Amino acid sequence: MESDIFPLLPAFRMVAATGGFTAASGRLGMTPSAVSQKIRQIEALIGARLFERTSRSVRLTEAGRLLLHDTDRAFSDITDALDRVRAVGKRPAGNLRINLSRLAAQACILPRLAGFVRHYPDITLELTTEDRLTDIVAQGFDAGIRFPGMLEMDMIARPIGPALRRPTLASPSYLQAAGIPQHPNDLAGHRVVRYRLPGSQRLQPLIFKVDGQVLRIDPPSRLVLDDNEHIALAIREGLGIAQRYMAADTIAVCSDDPVELLTQFEPDPHQFQLYYPSRGQPPKLQAFIEWFCG
């Protein structure tokens, strides 16, 4: 029975990854009815339903989730093995899928992207930018890029991109009207722009370092945004005080630039991590690591 199921598993995993028969059929190069037939064949062979089907959605059952989870490592190992075989005596090649946040794309990838694409013409690089956390194995990604505290379990990680500060900033016009805070606790009396985490929908606290200890505060907010560049705009427009990520070597260049506040309380810099599930990286991923992490 196992030999009958093996050829059908890619269709099952693609439906699970894309969330539907039509989307999976486009990726697999077959009709939706052919995909549906393969799923029915698997379900008949194992004696369990893998998907709950409605007119609007397709969802994994408990049996489906178990099958997806337990085949992840095997398919990852097979993909790595095939990539290594194909790459013998050749340049790194193939489709390389990276899942990363918008900030990671801006800070780590975009500045060096053109050079990588030109240097490796046989690699098809696919960048999926989303600020919600994603199971990179289940969704078919080769690697992800996130801050250290957001990595999935049992992943290999490499630092990537520049160290990023998180200073507290305000425009000169705002400070002239509202005054300059001298301590993080003074922010309770100011207009504060806050960042909402897109995944958890939690308001991110403002973080400071006071007497060697990390201090997290949740001041009332007048404006809530979920994009680092939108926060930069709000600061420049004088809409309030905010923290945002910046490259460690960023400096002010004119009198209208935002002013750094509470500098003696600034938290330690952060650096993004490139993470992936296997130590046997295929050549295409190894090329990416050497280019962007080297």
Image: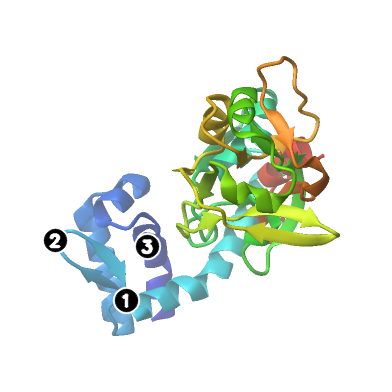
- Give the residue number, with chain letter if any, for mark 2: 55
Residue 283 spot, x, y in % from top left: 71, 45
In percent of the image, x 56 and y 53: which residue is there? 219
Quadrant including the N terminus: bottom left
- Mark positioned earlier in the residue sequence (2 or 3): 3
Q: In this rendering, is residue 128 above or below 213?
A: above
Q: Nearer the viewer, mark 2 or mark 3?
A: 2
Foreground pick, 65 / 246: 246
Instruction: Report helix, strand or loop for mark 1.
Output: loop
Q: How many marks?
A: 3
- Mark positioned earlier in the residue sequence (1 or 2): 2
Amino acid under disc 3: Ala
Instruction: Report helix, strand or loop for mark 2.
Output: loop
- Give the residue number, with chain letter if any, for mark 1: 61
Foreground pick, 7 / 51: 51
Q: CA distance from mark 1 to mark 2?
A: 16 Å
Q: In this rendering, is residue 135 above or below 289?
A: below
Foreground pick, 17 / 1: 17
Give the crowd class for mark 1: few <14, some 14-19, many >=20 residues within 10 Å.
Answer: some
The residue sitting at the left extreme is 55
Q: CA distance from mark 2 to mark 3?
A: 16 Å
Amino acid under disc 2: Ser
Left or right: where does residue 14 sit relative to residue 257?
Answer: left
Left or right: where does residue 15 sit relative to residue 225?
Answer: left
- Give the residue number, with chain letter if any, for mark 3: 16
Q: CB atoms at circles 1 and 2 under 8 Å apart?
A: no
Left or right: where does residue 11 sit relative to residue 157?
Answer: left
Q: CA distance from mark 1 to mark 3?
A: 10 Å
Amino acid under disc 1: Thr
Instruction: Report helix, strand or loop for mark 3.
Output: helix
Q: Quadrant of residue 17?
A: bottom left
Q: In this rendering, is residue 230 above or below 85?
A: above
